[in-house]
Image (spheres, coloured by chain):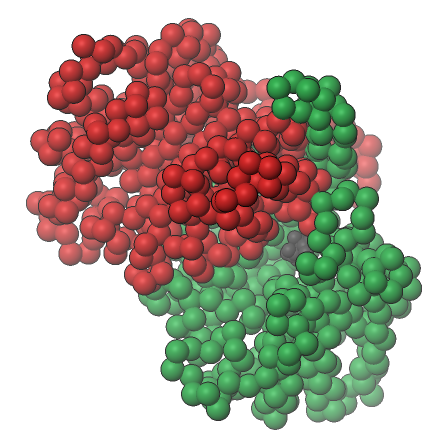
Chain colours: A red, B green
Amino acid sequence: TTTYKICLLAGDGIGPEIIAEGVKVLNAVGAKYDTAFEYTDALIGGAAIDATGNPLPQATLDAARASDAVLLAAVGGPKWDTTDPSAPRPEQGLLGIRKELGLYTNLRPVQIFNALADASTLRPEIVDGVDMMIVRELTGGLYFGRRERFYDEPEAGVNGAPGQRAYDTLEYSEYEIERIARQAFEIARKRRNKVTSVDKANVLETSRLWREIVHRVHDADYADVELEDLLVDNTAMQLINRPADFDVVVTENMFGDILSDEAAQITGSLGMLASASLGDGVALYEPSHGSAPDIAGRGIANPLAQILSVEMMLRYSFDMGEAADDIRRAVTEVLDAGWRTGDIKGADTPADQVVGTARMGDLVVEHL
Amino acid sequence: TTTYKICLLAGDGIGPEIIAEGVKVLNAVGAKYDTAFEYTDALIGGAAIDATGNPLPQATLDAARASDAVLLAAVGGPKWDTTDPSAPRPEQGLLGIRKELGLYTNLRPVQIFNALADASTLRPEIVDGVDMMIVRELTGGLYFGRRERFYDEPEAGVNGAPGQRAYDTLEYSEYEIERIARQAFEIARKRRNKVTSVDKANVLETSRLWREIVHRVHDADYADVELEDLLVDNTAMQLINRPADFDVVVTENMFGDILSDEAAQITGSLGMLASASLGDGVALYEPSHGSAPDIAGRGIANPLAQILSVEMMLRYSFDMGEAADDIRRAVTEVLDAGWRTGDIKGADTPADQVVGTARMGDLVVEHL
Ligand SMILES: CC(C)[C@H](C(=O)O)[C@@H](O)C(=O)O
Ligand SMILES: CC(C)[C@H](C(=O)O)[C@@H](O)C(=O)O
């Protein structure tokens, strides 16, 4: 029996409810494939602020580093929303663990389950065949640059009076761009061999550096992969116009944040999309959606993105491709059989096929 | 007879072709409303680089400042694309004139012409009733902040070797946020009285300042307007999910660039969308689309966004609301009569109703 240690970060909102279903599925997979999963719970986000004052306590980092993989649910909620620069915020927990574990590659697969093709607000013929992998740089750029707020700045107020001023810094180094570009090209070779690199090179200096390095890496080592540059504003359009044309999309942190959510919405079922954050050591897996505080604690959240993040964990961290395929097949079968949570039900879903969080987890396990 | 001086900036690509149609419509309006329009042509963008080495020659700025309004077509093209930080770029002309004329408010109305409802890749019931005004801050943020590229930086290269590094700065002052917020609230009062303010306040310091100031302005002077905050990643989703729910969307420069193009694509007819850039002096009007170098010089570009930017000019700069309504009515009639340019033709548009740039301009004039 192989044993893997998994650090569980339930976080906030629906987090505890959906992560329980991820664990349920892991246990079922373990039994089937003679693998033992050992779990350590740790605090992150708002839950960690409430308990310790710190969104990322040292104990959490220690637990994550001592594990073979991290399963995260979601962080954040209105309870901790503030514009006070000095107050701790849940998102610092997430940004902090990405940085501390060096998780520079964020993979967000965007696919449509046939049974849910109708969920998209786009026309069926437009979303037909959508299958892209967004590769988002996750530890650089605006989200990690120097930032500051100044008070009583001369002329920063209205009519030249003293007032407030703030800045954030978007910074990239050559090695950060090179390593994420390599990831994108490697992934493209296992897919349809095409990379779209997104930047704003007609305005930003970081984007011009981005474009230069991506092309250098391409020409030197990946000339067999098709490469196109697309400006971020144009990409925001083309994702809606011709989503099925995209294979691998690689971009910097903030563009990736915006575009991956846009692409997710194109499927119409954000509750189905998982993500993997990889670095050179332990990796982290989480749903693409947030903590949905409005429905927390009611047992109705969709656990499938969390379950599919377990699929990614098996594939990328434990090399258990067959078990990962099993999970995807089980989820597909459950959907094909008509089972839905509230967020993915259609106008014609019979009431007795709309199930809660735990029942959805059970159904996936039954199909494993 | 009233006389208005208009500075014409044709720019690059399809620019000269479409601006000619804008002028055609202005002349027709002038004849009807006993108003004289005097034109001065000036260089901007790639055309200005080719002629003078400078994307925004002083003569152009002088001409713009001496005019009552500026009509711009589009700038840019592959001919001038470069990642060399020191090379002149067409976009600098556009950014430069925005800054020099103090055009801090960019208005991008997003509406659907009934005749073109089918052009959207979104389902008809989703785009039905879409009518929003994107208010983009246009002279601050990342596009105007300090930026630099460094070579031979210790450890910026691969494996800790010396390499390149670059940064851009996202900066906002209180007065910049306050004045754009006021614009948004004022506009909302003339529309459906709702403002969505978009930021990334869970990560960026500039966004937290943004949110604080927007709320302060709201609570003090516009408490009658409904105000909601939406994170930029969530907005990228909701624009696809429920576009008809948005009324006024206000946001900083780069988020506005990305989201306004996304919103434009939701209509399916980017070739129909105009924009106005306003400050405290002379204003500038331009199509939302780019210079389309791939179809330049063939007489097939859609001039309607340019013509609708003339509509906005009449409305905002010359207080000629009736003449502006005339243009909109004429464009609507031309579309209702089935006339199309290549970009907006449908699968069932008869070949003899697909017209070129000049003929489309003539049709609008005939309907005035
Ligand atoms: C919570 C937030 C900091 C985070 C991000 O923007 O990176 C989230 O939106 C995501 O995409 O994982
Ligand atoms: C050409 C470019 C600098 C410009 C911008 O991003 O502002 C354009 O995309 C626009 O939106 O007007």
Foreground residue, B49 or B74? B49
x and y, in percent, of residue A82 in the image: 52, 28
Whether residue A348 sits left or right of residue A140 in the image: it is left
Q: Residue at x 68, y 58 (%)?
A: B78
x and y, in percent, of residue B358 in the image: 65, 85
Q: Residue at x 16, y 20 (%)?
A: A33
Above or below residue B135? Residue A182 is: above
Above or below residue A99? Residue A348 is: below
Decide if residue B217 is in sight here: no
x and y, in percent, of residue B246 in the image: 46, 56
Above or below residue A264? Residue A283 is: above
Foreground residue, B367 or B219? B367
Q: Can you say which quadrant of the picture contains the C terminus of chain A?
A: top left
The image quarter containing residue B355 is bottom right
Q: Residue at x 55, y 60 (%)?
A: B133
The image quarter containing residue B325 is bottom right
x and y, in percent, of residue A168 in the image: 66, 31
